[in-house]
Amino acid sequence: IQSTNSGSLGTNYDLLLNPNGGNVGIGTTGPGAKLDVKGTTNATQFILRANATQSNSNPLLTMLDSAGGELLRIHSDNSYNLFFGTYAGNDNNITGVGTQGLYNNFFGGQTGWHNTTGQANTAFGSAALRANTTGDSNSVFGRSTAISLNGGSSNTIFGAGGGGTLITGSSNILIGANADVPASNTSNFLNIGNTIYGNLSSGNVGIGTASPYGKLQIK
C-alpha cells in the first residue's frame, strides 16, 4: 500500500491509518492497542528485516517516550549476539577473523558500548564493561561493573561497581558491591566482599588481608 498524489504518481507520501484516533488490527477485528497483531497459526508473527548496511549505532528497534526521547534500543548483528539497551554493543565489530566480535551479550544502557573484537563477553547492568574493546570471556553483573576494563579477559565480577580499578588484568573473581583489585593489571585475584581475599595462582586465602602468605592467613 502506498499513498500517492493522483496528479503525480511518482511522488510518495506518508500512509496514515486512523490518523484521528482508533486502533489498527491485523488478524483481529477488535484491536486492543494502536497496533494489535493476532497470530492465526503456529508461526512467526512478526519479522523485522535489517537493511544490508544496518549498523549497531542504528538499531533494529528503538523505543521512545512521548516527547521523542530515547528509552531503549534492541539490536543484534549476528544470531550469537544480543544488545539490549541504549548504546549497548554500539561499537561491536565482527571482523570475520575467527570468532572476533561474536558470542557477546550486553544488557543495559551503555553496556559493552566500546567492545570491538572482544568475544564471548556477557555483561548485565548500566555501563557494565563499557570501555572494553578486545577483552574476551568476561562475565560481569551490576551497574558500572568493570567499567574501565579494557583488554583483560576471563574475569568474573558480581556486584555494582565491582572491578572499578581493573583495566588489563585477567582471570580475577570479584564478588560484592565495589569488590576490587589492588592494581589495574592485577590477575588471578579473589575478592569476596572486600573481606576474603585469595591468590588464584598459589591457592592462598586471606581473611582481612589482600596479600596472604600462606594457605590461610587471618589478619
Image (cartoon, grey):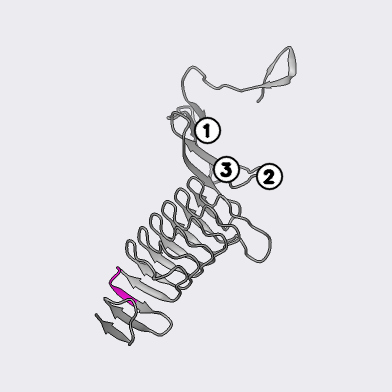
Disc 1 secondary structure class? loop
Identified by mark 3, the residue type is Leu
Image position, residue 161 (x, y; %): 37, 58
Q: Which residue is mark 2?
A: 53
Q: Quadrant of residue 4?
A: top right
Residue 136 falls inside the magenta stretch = no
Image position, residue 69 (x, y; %): 46, 34
In contact (CB < 8 Å): disc 3 and disc 2: no
- Disc number lying in front (1 or 3): 3
Identified by mark 1, the residue type is Gly
Taking the image as shown, residue 213 lies to the left or right of residue 12, namely left
Taking the image as shown, residue 40 lies to the left or right of residue 2, namely left
Q: Quadrant of the C terminus?
A: bottom left
Disc 3 secondary structure class? loop
Most common SS among magenta residues: loop
Residue density around tag 3, few if under 14, some if 14–19, many if 20 or more, within 10 Å: some
Q: Residue furthest front?
A: 183
Identified by mark 2, the residue type is Thr
Q: Which residue is mark 1?
A: 27
Foreground of the two, 17 or 180: 180
Q: Is 93 rendered above or below residue 43?
A: below
**Residue 39 seen in the figure:** no
Image position, residue 51 (x, y; %): 66, 42
Q: Which residue is mark 3?
A: 60
- Disc number lying in front (1 or 2): 2
Q: Residue furthest left?
A: 219
Question: Disc 1 to disc 3, how far (Cα)?
Answer: 24 Å
Residue range highlighted in magenta: 193-197
In contact (CB < 8 Å): disc 1 and disc 2: no
Q: Is 189 rendered above or below residue 94?
A: below
Q: Say which residue appears at 72% left-offset and 20% top-offset.
A: 11
Disc 2 secondary structure class? loop
